Amino acid sequence: MCGIVGAVAERNVQGILLEGLKRLEYRGYDSAGMTVRSPQGQLQRQRALGKVAALEERLAAEPLPGHSGIAHTRWATHGRPSEQNAHPHQSGERLAVVHNGIIENHEALRRELEGEGYVFTSETDTEVIAHLLERESRRVGDLLTAVQGVLAHLDGAYALGVIHADEPDVVIGARKGSPLVVGVGIDEAFLASDPLALLQVTDRFVYLQEGDAVRLSRGGVIKVVDADGYAVEREVQTFEHGDGAASKGDYRHFMLKEIHEQPAVIAAALEGRLGERSVLVESFGPDAEALFGQVKQIHIVACGTSYHAGMVARYWLERYTGVPVQVEVASEYRYRQVVVPEGTLFVTLSQSGETADTLAALRFARARGYLASLAICNVPGSSLVRESDLTLMTQAGPEIGVASTKAFTTQLTALMLLTLALGRVRGLDAGEQATLVEALRGLPGLVARVLELDPAIEALGTAFAEKHHALFLGRGAHFPIALEGALKLKEISYIHAEAYPAGELKHGPLALVDSEMPVISVAPNDELLDKLKSNLQEVRARGGELFVFADEQVGLAEEEGVHVLHLPHVHEALAPILYTVPLQLLSYHVAVLKGTDVDQPRNLAKSVTVE
Ligand code: G6P
């Protein structure tokens, strides 16, 4: 939700800020803006409705020279997308602020400030911060002190970047509840919502902690103060993934690139975590073995695609460890009177580690007597990772496409590792463990073979481009895969899609089936296959056109109205990972045919750091 960049450098900062915004567009892209302090000491601002490219055009016509600046790409929460509501927001001509997050008490603060004569020019919650800062900086004189003073009045979640015309070559940052990192350059310093935004200028980062504020000044001087106002040293960490992740390479879209990266990133997720015949329990940390022995229940909480990964894991965990599992979306969980039986492990799943509802769920859970919390996450240093007892990184590398692909399959891989680690501690049959470990080793190769079906899947996509609805069916652990397939199609092609457990078809959705409703089904070779085949006959009998992704060994043949695409045979437990891939490719090709914005679909954002 919204992306922030800031920079203080010897060179002009406009180019650094602009490149940073482009790399943060996945966080929001309804408007963008930048303020740079000119060498003469004036704040100069450019804002534009629409994507960062619109701002870039304005900057080409009227550049903003200077050595310190802040910039923002927006995903609207308070106030519609418009140039007036675009950040940076100013109080008068001397102070500007960019903000990611939500200020919950903004209405009361606005009334107070209006009472004092401040005039608001936008509908945003952010503008109260600008005026509060203006008031406070006049009182205390120094911008960092002013920011610290104002933070105490703000309820909600925020990451901020602030500049003041009277403080040459200084940018102040602060965070509580929204991500913010400091990029450490050579005699330069930067701020951003995500390290990715700054990889063109540095690979060294300080991950600010909750309540931290930071002052960046000329010569690369970085001063961090904690929530209590004390100056603190924060460790400088080197970013592990190369900058290649931030470019599309030869691919037309990030989403397609990320789909094709799956064999490599699934292998990365497994690397160093598999023993010869079992999973290395220490992959979850030194305390994992002792903790896993005490687990009697598991609660899994997540949002969006990550939630679907949790639903698959329930089938695995109950089947192989015998531990009862509940899975819930974070936005529901956090407002429920949750009953936590003794010995319950709390598991969060998140690509970003910054999703507001998931993070709030973790904080809510901490006070409820769980045995421990485990985060399965893709972003090292993210809030979820820092605040959990145990972590397992999914190693997918940065994911840019808003529709999640490789993050999902690596989450599933990590969840299978969890299943086998818990299973090992709880006495899962050694032969069964060895078979699954062997199957996991073969998984990247099988995913690569599924990717070879891309041209055939592209051809299938033509049947969908003119359709308005689609139905996805699956059974068992493939019901969540059907849900994920439907979500992908909705997100990027805007075709209305629903998913049902195939056995539920006759209880309602069958009424919708006719020649205009394509029905997509995944048919791996498992114990539910025969039941699924009967469900597919029910569709065929009503004139529905079927698209089936089936195991090459199941003997499903093409016929009039039934399109079958065969996938390589895979261990039944790992089939949900393999069968996700053709559904991703199908959605991708349908979206390309429809001409939608594949990587940045309308109304969505990659990382939802607001409730
Ligand atoms: C947003 C994204 C989804 C993602 C969800 C949860 O809605 O568009 O792709 O699945 O957030 O994000 P997380 O980072 O917690 O996995």
Image (cartoon, rainbow, N blue to C red):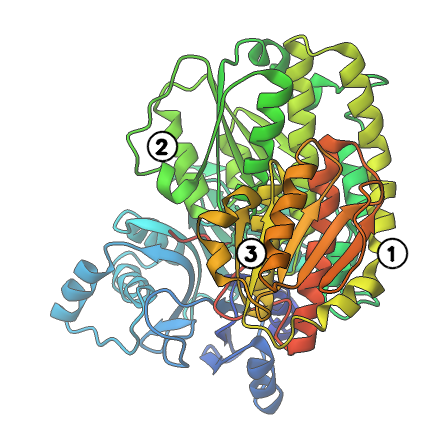
Residue furthest bottom as drawn: 61
Q: Name the residue type under label 1.
A: Glu
Give the CA distance from mark 2 to mark 1.
45 Å
What x and y, as percent, mark residue 117? Answer: 15, 74
Image point (80%, 13%), residue name: 431
Q: Is mark 3 within 8 Å of ligand 1?
A: no
Among the two numbered marks 3 and 2 on one chain, the one whose residue lies closer to the N terminus: 2
- Quadrant in the rendering for residue 555: top right
Image point (65%, 59%), residue name: 400
Q: Which residue is mark 2?
A: 364
Q: Is residue 260 left or right of residue 26?
A: right
Q: Which residue is mark 1?
A: 452
Q: Is residue 467 above or below residue 48?
A: above
Q: Which residue is mark 3?
A: 487
Local SS, label 2: helix
Q: Name the residue type under label 3.
A: Leu
Q: Name the residue type under label 2.
A: Phe
Residue 258 appears in view = yes
Q: Residue 331 shows which numbered tag?
A: none
Local SS, label 1: loop
Among the two numbered marks 3 and 1 on one chain, the one whose residue lies closer to the N terminus: 1
Using the image as rendered, state which of residue 204 and residue 285 is in the foreground: 285
Local SS, label 3: helix
Give the CA distance from mark 3 to mark 1.
23 Å
